[in-house]
Each structure stands twice: as C-alpha cells, then as structure tokens.
Amino acid sequence: MSTPLRPTPSPTAAEIRTPLARARGLGSAKAGAEHFWLQRVTAVANVVLVIALVVLIVTLAGADHASVRTALKNPLVSLLFLAFIVSGMTHMRLGMQTIIEDYVRGEGAKFALLMLNTFFAVMVGLTSVYAVLKLSFGA
Amino acid sequence: MLMAQANQKAAGRPARPLSPHLSIYRLSNSMLMSILHRITGGALYFGTLLLAWWLVAAAVGPSYYAFVNGVLWSWPGKIVLIGYTWALMHHMLGGIRHLIWDTGRGFDLKSVNTLSNVTLIGSLALTALIWLVALRMKGLL
C-alpha cells in the first residue's frame, strides 16, 4: 500500500508525538498506594491508641494539675500520647488531603491548602510532642 | 440546570451528561454514615487543637492549667467535648467498617445495613458510656 504523495504541512512537535507520549505524566502522581496503605496502618494503630487514651483521659477528666503531671511522668503514658500524636497527625493529614483534593477546584488554592494542611498537622503535632516531653522529663 | 452544566455552557462547551450525584439518590443509612465519616473526620482534625491546648496547659503550669480546665469543664466546654467524643467514636467505628470492607467482606446489602446501624448506635452508646463513667468519677452524677 503506497501513500499518495502530497505536500506535508510542517509538523509541530505536538503533532508528531504519539498519543502515549501526550498522555504520559498527566496521570496520578504514582503515590496513591502509599497514601492508601499509610491511611490503613495509622487507622489500625489509632483504634488501639484511642481506646487506651480514652480510658486514661476518663480517669483524668477534670483532674487537677498535680494528677495530670504525675500521670505523664509515667513513661508508658508519655509513650502512649507520643504514639497517638504521631499516628493521629499522620492519619488526619492524609484524610484532609483527600478532602482538599476532592472539593477544591482551582490549582493555586489546592496547592496552597495542601501545604497549609501539612503545616497544620506538623505544628499541632510538634507542639503536643513538646508539651508531653516537657511534662515527662520534669520541670 | 445543574451548576456544573451551567459552567460548561459558560465555558463555550456543550452541556454533557453528568453522572448522578447526591441530589439524585434517596438518602440511605449507609450513605449518611459515609457523609458523617467525612464530617467527623474533618471535625476531629480541628478537635486535635483541644488536645494540644490541654497538653500545653499542663506543660505551662498549675494556674494556666486551672484556667483551661475550667473552660473545658464549663457547660459549653462539656458540650463541645461530648460532641468531640461522639465524633471520635463514630469515626472509629466507621473506620473499622472500612477496614472490614478492605478485606473484601461485608458488601452485601444486609451486611452494609447492619454495619451502618452498628456504627450509628454504637457511637451513641459508647459516647453515653464514656460520659456516664467520667461524670460518675467526678461525682457529678
């Protein structure tokens, strides 16, 4: 089968690219499985940690400063709080990321909120960790 | 006309058919649980500020802790904390439901309905239990 000769318009780069080449790089960021898995791992951890924390906090409900300080002097209690802070902040950051990606339309607003989401989770987490360590190590 | 279709028209593109969305379906129990799972997740996100505040107050010292404790144990504070407790329990039970689904189990209609009811009734029951015990221990009940 011979191709009839006809004047070819000078092809631009876009036209000579194959459909595959044009589609490449436009899909997901290839990090979806990790996001899914980390959400599940922290979810399982949170179930255990939340139950333990709720029991602890119920016994401390409305307690005075001295009892709270005594409770957090216990390394196991401190570790429980630290584990929950790390697992909880990771889990909520991933969850809020999904909410932002679902509902925020503009690319600029989306990236700004995704960054803000990380800053929020890291700052709330670090502040809580700092407070727990200060209570745990004395002062 | 749906808003998205109006947007398409405004952008000079023909209105294309859209997949049915929330407003099309009759509200089902599992649909409500799904919506509540996301709302409670969002609420818990900001609720962590309360936990951080309480920890910081304890780290700062007795007088600031007494102030924060007073705010949290006031009646408006208690109502917020009861809401926080319910959100936590609902999101936890809803999460367990999702973990069960992740194993490929519980997708038949009967199981879906059972899991939805367990999530709702369980979250209310656990919240009531936690607060009964907490108020009892404080001698408030």
Image (tube, coloured by chain):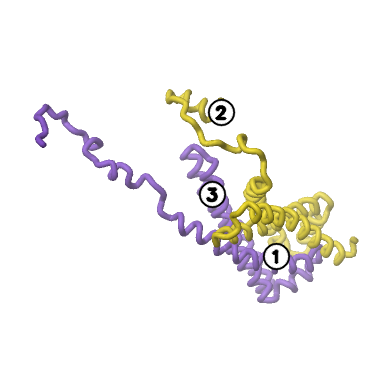
Chain colours: A purple, B yellow
Asked if labels 2 and 1 share a chain, the reply is yes
Depth check, mark 1 against mark 3: the one in front is 3
Residue at image position (55%, 36%) is B20
Type of amino acid under label 3: Thr
**C-alpha distance separating marks 2 and 1:** 53 Å
Q: Secondary structure at mark 1?
A: helix
According to the picture, the residue beneath numbered tag 1 turns out to be B59
According to the picture, the residue beneath numbered tag 2 turns out to be B2
The chain that hosts pointer 3 is A
Residue B21 vs residue A110, the one in the foreground: B21
Residue B73 in the image: x percent, y percent?
Answer: 82, 56
| Crowd rating for badge 1 (residues with CA inside 10 Å; few <14, some 14–19, many 20+) | many
Asked if labels 1 and 3 share a chain, the reply is no
Residue B49 vs residue A95, the one in the foreground: A95
Q: Classify residue B125 by image quadrant.
A: bottom right
According to the picture, the residue beneath numbered tag 3 turns out to be A98
| Crowd rating for badge 3 (residues with CA inside 10 Å; few <14, some 14–19, many 20+) | few
The chain that hosts pointer 2 is B
Type of amino acid under label 2: Leu
**C-alpha distance separating marks 3 and 2:** 24 Å
- Residue B83 shown left or right of residue B96 in the figure: right
Q: Which of the two discs, 2 and 1, labels the residue nearer the N terminus? A: 2
